[in-house]
Structure formats: structure tokens, C-alpha cells
Image: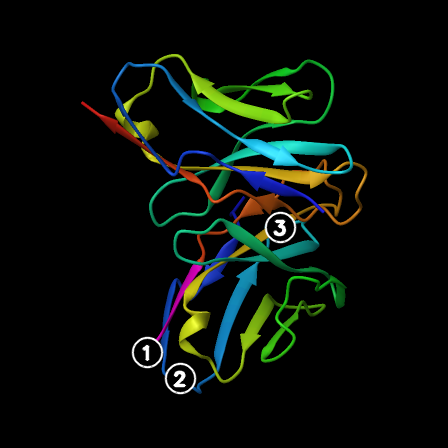
Amino acid sequence: NAGVMQNPRHLVRRRGQEARLRCSPMKGHSHVYWYRQLPEEGLKFMVYLQKENIIDESGMPKERFSAEFPKEGPSILRIQQVVRGDSAAYFCASSPMGDAIIEQYFGPGTRLTVT
Amino acid sequence: AQSVTQLDSQVPVFEEAPVELRCNYSSSVSVYLFWYVQYPNQGLQLLLKYLSGSTLVKGINGFEAEFNKSQTSFHLRKPSVHISDTAEYFCAVSPYGGSQGNLIFGKGTKLSVKP
């Protein structure tokens, strides 16, 4: 049973370009969480999605960031017009249910560098 | 709102010595408590969690943690560390009874085990 997959593992973008980060949850998991880890910081919650629905996006910046989890295919975190401050590691986690009791399984992360 | 404080950003220790990584939290509601480990260039892996019941929780790799409600602490301990325990450790909380499940992380503690 494959774990949570994220690609690409490393992504370099120039300021103003778009970044697309992909997350394939574990088999049988329909709940996906995105977190951002800035240098020397812990992970910060961004968004929680179920298939075709955004459940909680309270941690998402209001502009330039969007996320989706379509019926088919991976979850996508999209950052438009990237700036240097977007440089970070972005982690995706999945779980079979959206309950705090249920363990979240994390992917290896995508390290975004904005030049 | 909840917050998590990990008092030590770095902890150096010699192999086979005991170690304690400290975690304090603040919350107006009851919370579930978690410890995650992150090895270099990898995602987070759950070490252990406290949901209810016995305040001493045993996890993987010989780690254990004790929940102290009066001190709002959840310190992680291991009686004898190995070189392979070198990693970053994150304490996290999630509001009790929450349906969303998003985690609030501390900034992490880097454990460095020296031979």
C-alpha cells in the first residue's frame, strides 16, 4: 500500500510564475490536508479538502492560493504569481476520515524555491 | 484558539543517554496531543498520540510521553537514544471533538545524537 505521494519533490519558480503542487492520498483516503513549513517554523495548516469539496480553508492566504481535490486524480495546490515569501516546504497529509482522532499520514513534501 | 510551544529548538545528546523534549500547549478547550518525527527530506511520521485514558503513552521506537493536564504539558522521553533518532520532532494538538482534524504544530525540536 503506497503512502502519500507528492510531486514534484523540488520545484523552482521565478517570481511571477505559477506553481502547481500535486498530492495523491493513500488508497482509501478521501480527506486531504495541506500544510506549509517555512524555514525554522513548524507546519501551518492551510486547507482541508474532501473529494470535490473544500471543508476548511481558514489557513489559506486570501490571494493567489487555491486548492482542489477533484473526483478523479490528485489534489492540487496552486500558487499564482509566486513571490519569494512563498518559498517553503509544502506537505500534504491524508486520512480516511476527517476526525481529530484519526491519524494523518504525511507525504514527503514539495520544496518550493522562488528565485 | 490553540497554540503549542516547544521550549528547545535544538537538543544535543550523546548516544545511549536519556532525552526529554518539552512541549507545552495552550487551549481553551480539551485537545488531543501528538508527537511527530521528521527525518531529513522526509514527511512527518506519527510517534504517539494521547486521546484519553492513561496519561502515559507509549509510541514507536521506544518513545513515550506523559500528558500533564495541570501543567498543560506533553513531554516526550526516551531512556536511551540511538544515532538513528537524530531528527526533528514536532508536538501538535487538535481540538477535542473537532470534526475538521487540522493539527496545530509547535516549531519543532532538532534532536542531534552524537556518538
> In the rendered structure, the residue with mark 2 lies on which chain?
A
Q: Work out which residue is located at the far left of the displayed protein and give it.
A: B115
Residue type at tag 3: Ser
Residue A45 drawn at (x, y percent): 61, 55
Q: Residues within 10 Å of mark 3 (few under 14, many from 20)?
A: many
Mark 1 vs mark 3, foreground winner is: 1
Q: Which label belongs to residue A15?
A: 2
- Marks 1 and 3 sit apart, C-alpha to C-alpha, by 30 Å
Tell me the distance, in whole angstroms, between the alpha carbons under discs 2 and 3: 30 Å
| In the rendered image, the vertical position of residue A84 relative to residue A95, given as above or below | below
Label whose residue precedes the other's in the sequence (2 or 3): 2
Q: Is residue A45 magenta?
A: no
Residue that label 1 marks: A115
User: Which dot marks residue A94?
Assistant: 3
Q: Residue at point 64% right, 26% down?
A: B72
Same-subunit check for callouts 2 and 3: yes
Q: Residues within 10 Å of mark 1 (few under 14, many from 20)?
A: few
CB contact under 8 Å: marks 2 and 1: yes
Same chain assignment for discs 2 and 1: yes
Distance from Cα at disc 2 to Cα at disc 1: 6 Å
Upstream in sequence: badge 2 or badge 1: 2
Q: Quadrant of residue B17?
A: top left
Inspect the image, locate mark 2, and give the three-letter code of the amino acid beneath it: Arg
